[in-house]
Image (cartoon, grey):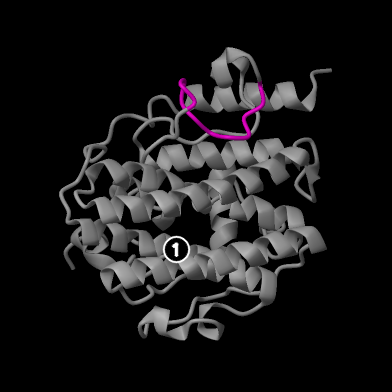
Amino acid sequence: MASPILFSAFLFILTLELDASQVMAAPDCGPIQATDVDRIEFALNLEFLEAEFFLNGALGRGLDSFAPSFAKGGPPPIGAKKANLDPLVAKIIEEFGYQEIGHLRAIINATGGIPRPLLDLSTQTFANIFNQAFGFKLTPPFDPYLNTINYLLASNLIPYVGLVGYVGTIPDLTSSDFRRLVAGLLGVEAGQDAVIRALLYERVNEIVLPYGKTVAEFVNRTAELKNRLANCGIKDEGIIVPQSLGAENRTNNNILSANTDSLSYARTPPEILRIVYGTGSENKPGGFYPNCAGGNIARRYLSPA
C-alpha cells in the first residue's frame, strides 16, 4: 500500500494537472498602479484579519480589547471566538496576535490607516472555504475553533497570503522608508507562516476527524484552491509535494512554499482579493470581507452598483 506521504504528493500533482486549464494567466496578474500609501494601507486588510483571528482564537477577545483606536470606528468582526487549543499552540497564537497589534501600529503610524473592514470569521465562512477546497460539503461543517488541528489548518489560510502580498509590494514602492517598513513586516509574516506549516508538517499523516483525510491532503487542497481563485499560476503549495517540485528536486518535504530557486512567490492586490473574497474575482466581495476590503485599492475594483 502506498504511504500517506506518497499519496499526498500524488494528490497534489493530480490537482495541478486537473486545474491546468483553470490556472491560466488572468487579465490582472501584473503590477498595478497605486501610491505607496495605498499599497501599504491595502495590507491593513490582512493585518486586521490576522489580528482578530489570532487574538480571538487564543484569548477570546479581539483588537477592541487591546487597541480599539486602531479600528478607526470600523465594525467588530463577525463570529470570531476562542478556539479549543492545546497549551503550546495557544501560547504561539497569542504571541502572533500581539505581533499583529504591532504591525497595525507600525502601518497606521506610517500612513494614517483605514477603518477596520467588516470581517467574517464565523465557522460558516471557514466551512465554505474548506467545502470549496474539497469540492463537496464536509459533514459536519468544518469548525476552525473546535480543536488545535482545525485551527492550524484554518490559520494556514491567512499569514501566507499576507507574506506573498508583501513580496509583491516591495519592488513597486518608491520610498525607502516604506520599503524598510514592509521588509520588517514581511520578516515576521514569513516566520508566522513557517511556524504554522512546521506544526502542520509535524502532524502530516494525522487523520483530521471525522473527515478521514490527512493533514497533508487538507493543506494540499487549500493550496490548490488559493491558486485556482487567484488565477495567476502556482504560487501556493502543500506541505508534501512530488520530488520534482521539492527544493532542488531532492525532497518531498515542503515546509516552506517557494519557487524553483527557493525564492518566495509574489501576489498582486487583485490576486489577494480573489482569494480572501473566496469568489475568484476582485470585483465581488465575500468570504472574509462580505462588504469589501478597505482602502483605495480594494474600492477601485468594486463592481458598479
Q: Is residue 206 magenta?
A: no
Q: Residue 72: x and y, percent?
A: 35, 82
Residue at the image point whose x is 42% and y is 71% from the top = 105
Residue kind at label 1, given as amino acid type: Glu
Q: Residue 118: x and y, percent?
A: 41, 74
Q: Is residue 259 magenta?
A: yes
Residue at the image point whose x is 23% and y is 48% from the top = 173
160 sits left or right of 153 in the view: left
Question: Relative to 61, is 108 above or below?
Answer: above
* Residue 219 in which image quadrant: top right
Q: Residue 17: x and y, percent?
A: 49, 21
Magenta region, residue range? 252-262
Residue at the image point whose x is 29% and y is 49% from the top = 270
- Mark 1, Cα crowd under 10 Å, few <14 / some 14-19 / many 20+, is many
Instruction: Please indicate, yes or no, whether residue 286 appears anywhere in the rendered image.
Output: no
Assign a secondary structure to mark 1.
Answer: helix
Could you tell me which quadrant the C terminus lies in?
bottom left
Question: Relative to 166, is 37 above or below?
Answer: below
| Main secondary structure found in the magenta portion | loop
115 sits left or right of 258 in the view: left
Instruction: Please indicate, yes or no, whether residue 21 appears anywhere in the rendered image.
Output: yes
Q: Residue 120: x and y, percent?
A: 49, 69
In the picture as drawn, the residue positioned furthest to the right comes out as: 1
Could you tell me which quadrant the N terminus lies in?
top right
Give whichever of 236, 127 is nearer the camera. 236
236 sits left or right of 303 in the view: right
Question: To which residue does mark 1 refer?
Answer: 47
Give whichever of 159, 109 is nearer the camera. 109
* Residue 199 in which image quadrant: top right
Residue at the image point whose x is 33% and y is 42% from the top = 168
1 sits left or right of 197 in the view: right
Give whichever of 35, 298 is nearer the camera. 35
